[in-house]
Image (spheres, helix red, strand yellow):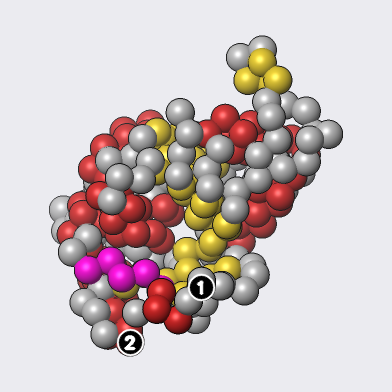
Amino acid sequence: MKLDILAIGAHPDDVELGCGATIAKEISNGKRVGILDLTRGELGTRGSAEIRDIEAANAAKILGASMRHNLEFSDGFFVNNAATQLEIIKIIRKYQPDIVLCNAIDDRHIDHGKGSKLASDACFLSGLPKIETFHEGNHQKAWRPKHVYHYIQWKNIEPDFVVDVTGFIDKKRAAVFAYESQFHNANANEPETPITSTNFRDSITYRAQDLGRLIGVEHAEGFTSERFVAVKTLSDLI
């Protein structure tokens, strides 16, 4: 199965929080979108890896993702090296996405920046024919995605471009809150974290509203790019 878009996150819920509405919109337009999680989020203060496995599957179903896979790298301790790069390369070559969405280049959680660089490096290396990988005993052909973009996470990084996601914020919120163990719950007995506050819960909407305000729409999500963002004509701009 070939994908149009592969969204990569260091932890389950990174993709939903960073670009859930964009994914939902692309899927509604007939695009095949897959999700690749690098870790199971086992170091998360709340819940467990097993709980997040279930939550991630539920979130993918809400969004309508064509596939979701977890590489089970070590949460907090994975590194950007040949071994981890090759595992991502195998996924890229298997699904041949045209676009890859990945973690913020710089963010509060150290895994986000590490995951961003790891995914970006793997996208480049995946296009080198002399790097040999195999899937189910078959040699994989080289494949390099046309575009690699980084979604925005905790920090309010200035985007290089924004996507109008009006009409899809409710689906994003539903996918995010499929991770019931991670976010605000007045009855929870587990420790509070930066993402369990009502402010963080509400920020999912108000940050999208603010980006939307700036471009004259209801809601938007922002992305950064490692290269110049180009348009074919001025008419492509909104």
Q: How many marks?
A: 2
Image quarter hosting the C terminus: bottom left
Residue 32 in the image: state x and y as whole percent.
Answer: 38, 41
Q: CA distance from mark 2 to mark 1?
A: 20 Å
Residue at left offset 36%, top offset 35%: 66
The magenta-colored residue range is 162-166
Q: Which mark is residue 231?
A: 1
Would you identify the image quadrant in which residue 19 lies?
A: bottom left
Q: Pointer 1: residues within 10 angstroms few (<14), some, or many (20+)?
A: few
Q: Residue furthest right?
A: 130
- Relative to 138, is 236 above or below? below
The mark that comes first in sequence, 2 or 1, is 2
Numbered label attached to residue 216 = none
State the SS at label 2. Answer: helix
- Between 209 and 115, the one nearer to me in the picture: 209
Disc 1 residue type? Val
Quadrant including the N terminus? top left
Whether residue 184 sits left or right of residue 53 in the image: it is left
Residue placed under numbered mark 2 in the picture: 214
Position in image of residue 71 (x %, y %) = 55, 34
Q: Residue at x 38, y 50 (%)?
A: 13
The x, y position of residue 197, in whole percent, is 28, 67
Any magenta on residue 164?
yes
Amino acid type assigned to the residue bearing label 2 in the image? Leu
In this rendering, would 90 be left or right of 178? right
Is any part of residue 115 visible from this angle? no
Please report contact status of discs 2 and 1: CB closer than 8 Å, yes or no.
no
Name the residue located 72 percent from the left edge and 26 percent from the top edge: 133
